[in-house]
Image (tube, rainbow, N blue to C red):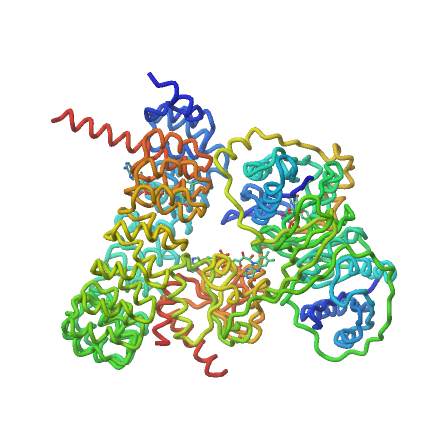
Amino acid sequence: MIPAETQANNAHAAAPATQRPSLPQLLEQARETGDIYLAAALYPFAGNAERRALEDLLFASTKQKRQFAGAPYTPAPLLGRLAEITTETKLLARIARHPAVTAETLAYIVDKDQSEAVLAAVAAHQRAPMDLLDTLDWQDSVAVQKGLAGNLNTSTRTLKAIAAEAPLEVLKEIAKNPNADAELLTDLWSRGDEYLRAEVAANEQCTESIRTAAETLDSELVRRMLAANPAASVEQLLRLLNDPAAAVRAAAVRNLLLPAEDLQDYADDPSRQVRRTEAQRTGLADSMLEHLAEDEDHWVRRWVARNSSTPELILRSLAQDEVAEVRRAVVRNPMCPADLVATLARDPDSWVRAGVAFRKDVSEAILLELADEEDPDILTGVGQNSAAPLAILHRIASHRDKDIRRAVILNQQAPREVVQPLLDDPYPLNRAMLVKHPALTSADLSQLADDPEPQVRFMAVQSIIRSSGQDRAADAKTRNH
Amino acid sequence: MKILVAVKQIAALDEDFELREDGKDVDPDYLDYELNEWDDYSYEEALRIMEAGGEGEVEIVPVTVGPDEADDGLRRCLAKGGERGIRIWDDAITGSDPSAIARILVKVIEREQPDMVFAGTLSSDHSFAQTGMAIAAGLGWPHAAVVNHLEYKPGDSSAVVHRELEGGLEEKLSIDLPAVLTIQLGINDPRYASLRGIKQAKSKDIEVLSHGDLGLSDDDVGEKGSLSRVRRMVIPEKGQAEMIEGTAAEQAERVAQIVKELKGAA
Amino acid sequence: MSGILVVSEHRQGELTPSSLEVIAAARQLKAEKEQPLMVAVLANNPDDYASQVNREGVDEIIKISTPEEEFQVDAYEAAINSLINERAPSIVMVPHSVDAWGYAPVVAERGKYGFASDVFGLRYEGDDLVATRAAYAEKIHMELEFPGKETVLLTVRGNVFKPVEGEGSAKVTDFDFSDASPHTQHLEYIEPESGGDVDISQAEFMLSIGRGIDEEENVEQFQELADIMGFTLGCSRPIADNGWLPKFRQVGQSGKTVASCNVYIALGISGSVQHMAGMKHVPNIIAINKDPEASIFSIARYGVVGDLFEVAEELRNHFE
Ligand SMILES: Cc1cc2nc3c(=O)[nH]c(=O)nc-3n(C[C@H](O)[C@H](O)[C@H](O)COP(=O)(O)OP(=O)(O)OC[C@H]3O[C@@H](n4cnc5c(N)ncnc54)[C@H](O)[C@@H]3O)c2cc1C
Ligand SMILES: Cc1cc2nc3c(=O)[nH]c(=O)nc-3n(C[C@H](O)[C@H](O)[C@H](O)COP(=O)(O)OP(=O)(O)OC[C@H]3O[C@@H](n4cnc5c(N)ncnc54)[C@H](O)[C@@H]3O)c2cc1C
Ligand SMILES: Cc1cc2nc3c(=O)[nH]c(=O)nc-3n(C[C@H](O)[C@H](O)[C@H](O)COP(=O)(O)OP(=O)(O)OC[C@H]3O[C@@H](n4cnc5c(N)ncnc54)[C@H](O)[C@@H]3O)c2cc1C
């Protein structure tokens, strides 16, 4: 029995509020209201007969077919079915471009339509498996060649075949591909202009002899890309650290293969770009960090302040930096000690105080103080903070600024009583984000399944069905025990 | 006191649209409709005047010329406030340019006798920037275009407005009432409708009229009632820009080279 | 009916540059089909402006003295309607300016003239005038004709026609109209907020960001890039409306015109008419946009189709 009171409150909902609507109920709701978004969300979970019924609704017009072929939210089974029922090249190419389409559907589409638009879409598709890509006809189309060249699933064999015939612009894509082997890269290197060589030099698979050759080339770009190669040797990186070009040195510094202690002697690099990069590395010696913390360039100091290996003492001095962004970086550093956080909570700059508001380890007293401010960034931080007291969350949840209200929606720890009123938030984006909040009950989700905004209904129905699936799985587990 | 707000559904093109067989418009299959962005602002301005007035003192009425689907635009407005809307349509209206549309709206206004009329400055699809002022011409009312600030209380015999001019300059002027104003983006911060409002709007009254109901003849609307006729539509050629191809490194290098040459020359 | 009538405009004592562009557009039509070209000047004291519009190809300058020195909508409408009645031109051309948005549709409606706004292309097909303007957010061009109309009024898009130069030898005449009672009264002009040291209208090198930068947090890296490159940072209107950058950095119709700019890099700006109004004249526009169809490419000298973040990251390497 459903208590009368709950029933009255949810008169608009499709199902009684105390229990989650079942799949058949939702299907009924979709058919009755003619809601295509509900239908699209339910489609993957429906049986065959039900799917046919939903299709009448979903594919009622060419316009809707086009819409679903291109919409980012269309579930894979729906794309598969759409591919079956159409012969229109434009539509098939759209489906083949869709990121969610399955490998089977891609194979099916290639079977059905070999137009360039379709082949180019499949060639570039990340879900296209290697064997399908191997069969594509690329001879007459640079677009297909480019797609294959950039696809991580393209086989070495196919890459080699294309490389033998393709124009330079395609070769550049091939040189980036991790499936390009040493032999292919060596071939490309020998045929390459500077840019092609740069891509080869950056590729993990390139041979040591190429890397050696790259190092001595006159091209800064090639050396810079080499310095970023995740397979470069430490000796080589050390040499590149002395390169005349700052961008090359900076790339070497960024390469994690280079041990941090080897940077010790380079703390005075004349280029601020290099020093800025150094300041971002973890594991630097304290003396080096100390040195960088006094850099004239505030971006260098900023990165030191943000660096998790920076010792407390240095953080304390950076917390008094004249540039607010540096102080902000200190407070965003997870290692910032509690007393320093407390000091920075009273910083004259609101952007620094907002940094405090976002810290998970901040005390309740500080949060209470910050909650009285008016700055939207600070209030957003407080609202998202899992340590924020209930009374404050309530207040932020009813703030007149929609972006500030959203903070509590993003706060995964906020209890249901705080987020529940936001089911009626006038700002559609807030409701769309609320759907994913873990504290919502099935009654809440049912209400959202009836939302005026299609996106909200769609996501709510997805959540309802997925969580009932989890319940069933959990039930089965208990039974097995 | 009554404010009438003219609102319109604009058409957005689907990515691979096609032209109609006769080449005079886009195949309607490739069009999606939504309320003109400017109309959110003009309706908000009307709502604020309504809310500042006493209970029942100010009525606001959204009006549109368009087929069935245009009801969506009216309901979007009514979800925020107002009790009724008016939509005018029949097949003879097809092919109307802004002047013919304005003529229809003039008839509605003469019937409704509002004290003020708002329209959007322009629309994001066709950008004629014409409809509002053509209404004023038909009514013989005072008018001002591109208003981004309005000082007015119900009962006033004149209002102070700012017109947004070129280059960030504004003109402050006073205007006699009743008047037609076209409202510019940024005049306010439009609200979102509450869920309750959206639900209520579904049952609010939308009066549907034909041009005949308003005493207009076939010659007053459609192609015959227009000041222009579409000869054809063409999809423009791509621009003459030199496209810089290659990897991001290559593109950036070329841009840097161009910039350095130009800076050097300067 | 014959002849082309251009209505020139001015504000705060300056002839607007678009007035000379409209004369240029009119001369183009005159070259296609010989007819007299008249330019009207409306002001309390029209003499100064009259000499400024005396350019090559202009046959007659018509001075109309209005009660106010500055634009007043009712006076403009009454004067133009009665001038058209008397002179019966076949074409009337005015700038597509904010002032014209106020008066042109009214003039057209009263006289039942043919009308098209925001026109950027004009030609004759036989005896018929064909005007081209944009539709569907600039993605399509719409050609309009005016069957049965003896007079057609057009508002002409700015920065399309090159302003006429050379001195002319037009005769100058006066025209009186019966004054309309004004329904609006000018109170004052409000100047835009100034940006201290930064005046983008004086900048020679501009890097402008649009909605493509996605989030407020990203603004800073472009500020840094502009610094490194020695460029002045500008933006499109949504960026200023959101408060991500101050209003004085906004380029476009309701922002500033980057009058002195030589190189303009547009990052993630689609190229709306209103934005282009402030930068279209720049000789070296470099557009970076991930959408190859973006209208900004139609006016750019160089185009980069790509992700603005990637290109910007690479770009800084060349200026560090
Ligand atoms: C008109 C409309 C507009 C939309 N616009 C947006 C938008 O602008 N931005 C936006 O973020 N979203 C939008 N969405 C919703 C969006 O498509 C997704 O549904 C939503 O983001 C949920 O994503 P997710 O992270 O929960 O699931 P994802 O991680 O995106 O799930 C992808 C797929 O994984 C599978 N899956 C994932 N988890 C489970 C599970 N627990 N059980 C079974 N299967 C599972 C499902 O098959 C699902 O389709 C829109 C929807 C509609 C209808
Ligand atoms: C020769 C010609 C034929 C055309 N044929 C058609 C056609 O067959 N079908 C078609 O859909 N369009 C047609 N159009 C386009 C149509 O005339 C315009 O969309 C419309 O007149 C408004 O112009 P605009 O959108 O540029 O609005 P603007 O003049 O820029 O003004 C925008 C503001 O005007 C008001 N407004 C504009 N239109 C309406 C409306 N319909 N109802 C209420 N208020 C409104 C609103 O306040 C809106 O914010 C035609 C145009 C021409 C020139
Ligand atoms: C009277 C009036 C005055 C106006 N005045 C002005 C004015 O002065 N100035 C002005 O700018 N606007 C003005 N507008 C507003 C104008 O109509 C447009 O709304 C505005 O210019 C759009 O700004 P945008 O190009 O930044 O944004 P959008 O049109 O949203 O364009 C964003 C672009 O970024 C691209 N992009 C997105 N992500 C990436 C990426 N990762 N890499 C590369 N590219 C990317 C997209 O492809 C898109 O082209 C005015 C309007 C009116 C009616």
Closer to us: A134 or A287: A287
Q: Where is residue A292 in the image (x, y as percent from the top left)?
A: 23, 74
Please state, as top left, top right, bottom left or bottom right, where the N terminus of chain A lies in the image: top left
Report the residue at 32% width, 73% height from top: A193
Q: Position of residue C274 (x, y in %)?
A: 58, 61
Numbered label tally: 0
- Does residue C59 sit above or below B234 in this rendering? below
Please state, as top left, top right, bottom left or bottom right, where the C terminus of chain A lies in the image: top left
Closer to us: A358 or B57: B57
Q: In the shown orientation, is residue B9 left or right of residue C107?
A: left
* Residue A136 in view, yes or no: no
Q: Where is residue C100 in the image (x, y as percent from the top left)?
A: 71, 60
* Residue A248 in view, yes or no: yes
- Does residue C74 sit above or below A211 in this rendering? above
Q: In the shown orientation, is residue A72 left or right of residue A135?
A: right
Q: Position of residue A280 (x, y in %)?
A: 24, 67
Picture quarter containing residue C97? bottom right
Report the residue at 69% width, 58% height from top: B173
